[in-house]
DNA sequence: TTGCATCTTGACCATTTGGTCAAAAGCACC
DNA sequence: GGTGCTTTTGACCAAATGGTCAAGATGCAA
């Protein structure tokens, strides 16, 4: 996770921060996520973030030394969540199940943290000024690893011949699309991933499509928890 | 195309504008496209757009009354290009050829006007403040029409049963991804759609994937023009 | 060349906004 | 209740930026 941090006021309880600090930093990061994802870095204002977090601008700047520091911290705040699903792709597992699981997680995140998706998209679209280093190291390594997994599936004849990178890109693209372009989708259909039915249908459609592209079919639905 | 316009200085040659006006408006719109797609609406500065267009800020504001007017005009400037490919989907044509053609056009645009793609993505991600009305009318109508086309293909047994909307979304998502997330892709692979080989490979991979999802295979490559 | 509309610009203004600072309010511990 | 840290805030500042304006340059028809 390289440098990415947001400076903590001077001497804090060793190994952690005070209750107040912890609470406020979280409040701020949540507000920042909302603001930055809605308006982008330049469009966001520190004042509004502070208001959303329920404190004065000065106080916010007591916790984070600058707008940039808030932004960077917000990015770091979501990055783990963002990358976690890919890490679960397991070479030993059944490809259909693995891919379906990955897609389910991605869509779940698009549904529950659309702001995270948009923040990330925004950052990358602006040229990834803050996280390019991470993309070039951590993400690159992770992706290379998973490309190898997919290649092993191909080699074992478990899925049809495919360009692993493009497979990954299209999973990213399709799943994130429902968060990033939610407004457009809503304008066209009135639906939204916050709509349970639409979410289920989306997950099914995306999964079916991706699996078909590597010659697989939908795995059996996991029976309801009942 | 609803309202979307950018005000022309007072009395102009009936039915058109002077040479200078035409030239400068184009210069400005090109510069604006670059700037807005790179920094988003708020992050863009009129000064920089003017510089890029090779004129003073005051002069730019002689042609467009405000930053917002430039932005709106830039959106209108790209909107046609943006929507054109979908219009070509022909019910009478062969589904594999039609879809492949559509995908080719989308990727072509992602490659040659990545700024257009990013500008559009940016606008939609910010809640489509300017073009929501267009999405809800023109785009909605166009999409409904093409959904019907796809449904007719399904009814005729030409492609396998699919959710037409999701099919369209995934074509949008995958093709635009290569423009919007170009930086990320470059960070991972060093490649880019400006790379002819990579572009060809991408087009092939995306087409293959989309076609497979509806039970089709790649149509024969059109032989080289030789 | 003159006269007029178009075009172009620098000086200027008001507002927004990121960030500083010193002082006040809380709070914990003796 | 005093002492010293942490937390909180309003007043304030400087830079950036969108937009105005009056004056000057340019192009063009007669």
Image (tube, coloured by chain):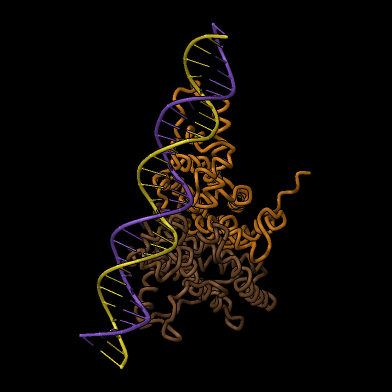
Chain colours: A orange, B brown, C purple, D yellow
Q: Position of residue B84 (x, y in %)?
A: 52, 76
Q: Residue at x 42, y 82 (%)?
A: B12
Q: Which residue is situated farthest in the right direction here? A: A226
Q: Depth check: A143 or B174 in front?
A: B174
Residue A179 pos. (x, y %): 59, 55
- The quadrant of the rendering that contains the C terminus of chain A is top right
Q: Is residue B105 visible?
A: no
**Residue A69 in sight from this viewpoint:** yes
Q: Nearer the viewer, residue A176 or B78?
A: B78
- Residue B105 screen position, x and y as percent: 48, 73
Answer with left or right where residue A27 lies relative to residue B193: right
Name the image quarter holding the N terminus of chain A.
Answer: top left
Q: Is residue A135 left or right of residue B144?
A: left
In the displayed structure, A85 sits above or below B223; it is above
For the residue pair A114 and A197, the one nearer the viewer reads as: A114
- Please name the residue shown 57% across and 78% down the image: B89
Image vertical order of residue A217 relative to residue B144, above or below: above
The tally of labels here is: 0
Q: Is residue A32 left or right of residue B114?
A: right
Q: Give whichever of B194, B70 is nearer the camera.
A: B70
Q: Position of residue B18 (x, y in %)?
A: 37, 82
The residue drawn where x is 38% and y is 78% is: B22
From this view, report whether residue A129 is shown above or below residue A11: below
């Amino acid at each position: 996770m390289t440098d990415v941090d947001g400076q903590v006021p001077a001497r804090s309880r060793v190994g952690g921060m005070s209750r107040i600090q912890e609470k406020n930093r979280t409040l701020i990061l949540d507000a920042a996520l909302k603001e930055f994802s809605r308006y982008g870095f330049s469009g966001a204002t520190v004042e509004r973030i502070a208001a959303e977090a329920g404190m004065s601008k000065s106080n916010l700047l007591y916790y984070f030394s600058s707008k940039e520091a808030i932004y960077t911290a917000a990015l770091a705040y979501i990055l783990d969540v963002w990358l976690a699903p890919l890490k679960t792709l397991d070479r030993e597992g059944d490809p259909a199940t693995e891919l379906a699981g990955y897609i389910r997680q991605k869509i779940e995140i698009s549904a529950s943290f659309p702001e995270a998706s948009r923040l990330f998209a925004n950052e990358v679209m602006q040229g990834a000024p803050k996280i390019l280093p991470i993309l070039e190291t951590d993400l690159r390594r992770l992706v290379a690893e998973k490309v190898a997994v997919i290649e092993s599936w191909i080699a074992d004849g478990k899925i049809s011949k495919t360009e692993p990178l493009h497979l990954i890109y299209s999973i990213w693209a399709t799943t994130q699309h429902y968060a990033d372009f939610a407004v457009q989708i809503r304008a066209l259909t009135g639906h939204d991933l916050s709509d349970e039915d639409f979410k289920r249908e989306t997950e099914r459609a995306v999964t079916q499509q991706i699996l078909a592209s590597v010659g697989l079919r939908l795995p059996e639905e996991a029976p309801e928890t009942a």
